[in-house]
Image (cartoon, coloured by chain):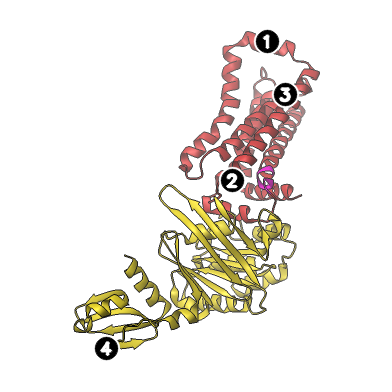
Amino acid sequence: MRIFKYAKIDFIMSKRFVLFMLLFPILAFIIVLKDTDSTPLFASIYCLFIGIILSSSPRMSQHQTESGFSKMLPSKSGEDVKGHFLFAFCLLLFSLLLSWIIIGVAALLRPQLDFGPFHYYVLVLGAALVFSGIENLIYYLIPTDYAPQTANLLRLLPGMLFFFGGIFFADSLPNIVLWFVTWINPLRSYILFFLSAIIFLIFMEIAVVRNNSRDAL
Amino acid sequence: MNLLEVRNIQKQYRDFSLQDISFSLPAGYIMGYIGQNGAGKTTTLNIITHLAHTVSGSVSIDGIRFEDDPVKYREMIGYIGDTSYFPEMLTLQNIREILKDFYPSFRPQEFDHYVNRWNLPLKKQIRTYSRGMKVKLMFASVLSRDTKLLILDEATNGLDPMVRKEVLTLLQEYISDGQKSVLFSTHILEDLEQIADYIFFIDNGKKIFCDAREELTDRYLLVRGGNDDLTPALSHALIGIERNKFGFEALYSAKSDIILPAGILTAKPTIDQIVVHMIQEMR
């Protein structure tokens, strides 16, 4: 139960990022509506990209001394870390839902728009989970006395890799992408998503161990 | 019964080590935890609040160690630091909501009472608060729930005299039922003269003394005299001699065998004076 309470703190602290978060769905909406060649899946990728970036923002935006507040709240070992990972997971789900709303609205304006196979979205969510897991794990691996600017730069890497790395991969290796698109089917997508979720949980447990072994302040 | 038991805690940093610190604080009393900057005060408090890990030793509050029951252990502590630990982007309303979620004993009406009493703005971000307002918010958050041990880390630094006086009154009210205690780390030793029952003095990570305040001030005399009065035999019996062109000032142990010569002025020392001369002696 306290895990949910910690996730709630992250939600309270991320309120100020909401406006920023809405910028990307608007951009995605315009692309889906205007670029008739692109798949609506891009809207989800855009939204998940910003979801990954923001999933660790509530903590990264805190000064070191401020983290003492959540560290002193009554809880068992690791519950605060798990709460942060739960927040990240919920934010990615929210990002995906937001992208579906955008695609839905775009479909109203452009009826010929094809949503595409559902399992592609599940697959992309799985990939976002892994990258978000890495990003949140980085937060706990970086020493507490690290320069905030460097720490923030390191934190942004997984999200950037997810988005720009994905685009680079798709552009540079079209044959592999084509093979993958024909290979992937709903069952394989769901299995890959399940594996992604396990990887996310493993990252969470590593973060718990790391957090327990270091001083908060 | 001892409310706080600290046994042989140690902590090693690259350039500092906290060495074998032990003390106990009975329920219903206030202990002043004093020392120079970098002496190890905050490190000790961080170990007690479990924000820092100790390499050895143990800490228990009301007989409970963190390892036994981390939830109850943390519920028993009320911490007020020298800087606000609340995330600066939050508002007082957010803090109230979080405290309500986490502390079963949190009393929202009492929290609102303190908030109104101190005119703390509800909807402004904590970052816009003055230092005094932040300290008051920290007090409101710990006084509106059931705690056993209040830990203050330089909390009264930079506060105006009226607020400081109010804080000292609050601390005395806090321990008045004889069930709770206060561990108060501060540079302002004048505050401790008024409210502390025990004084723990730490220097360079080592315990120098831990005594009841009255016993401590009874144990020494503050002596002043001319430079001619300072014979080698007397110098040997004095602690932390400070010389100037008019004479000297030092501490004199009340148990000393050396009899003070005529013309030496004596007075009961303040804690501040005891500490200053102790540090002078150690240097």
State left or right for residue B256 relative to residue B76.
Answer: left
Q: Which residue is mark 4?
A: B261
The local crowd at label 4, few if under 14, some if 14 to 19, many if 20 or more residues have their Cα within 10 Å, is: few
Q: Which chain is red?
A: A
Secondary structure type for disc 4:
loop
Give the Cα separation between the discs numbered 1 and 2.
39 Å
- Of circles 1 and 4, the one toward us is 4
Q: Chain of mark 3?
A: A
Q: Colour of chain B?
A: yellow
Q: Chain of mark 1?
A: A
Are tags 1 and 2 found on a single chain? yes
Q: Is residue A118 visible?
A: yes
The residues colored magenta run: A77-82
Q: Amino acid at mark 4?
A: Pro
Q: Which residue is mark 1?
A: A178
Q: Amino acid at mark 2?
A: Arg
Of callouts 1 and 2, which one flags the residue occurring earlier in the amino acid sequence? 2
Name the residue: 69% across, 53% down.
A75
User: Looking at the rendering, in which quadrant would you find the C terminus of chain B?
Assistant: bottom left
Give residue A24's position: percent from left, percent from top: 62, 34
- Of circles 4 and 3, the one toward us is 4
Q: Which residue is mark 2?
A: A59
Image height check: is B93 above or below B136?
Answer: above
The secondary structure that dominates the magenta segment is helix
Give the Cα separation between the discs numbered 3 and 1.
15 Å
Q: Amino acid at mark 1?
A: Leu
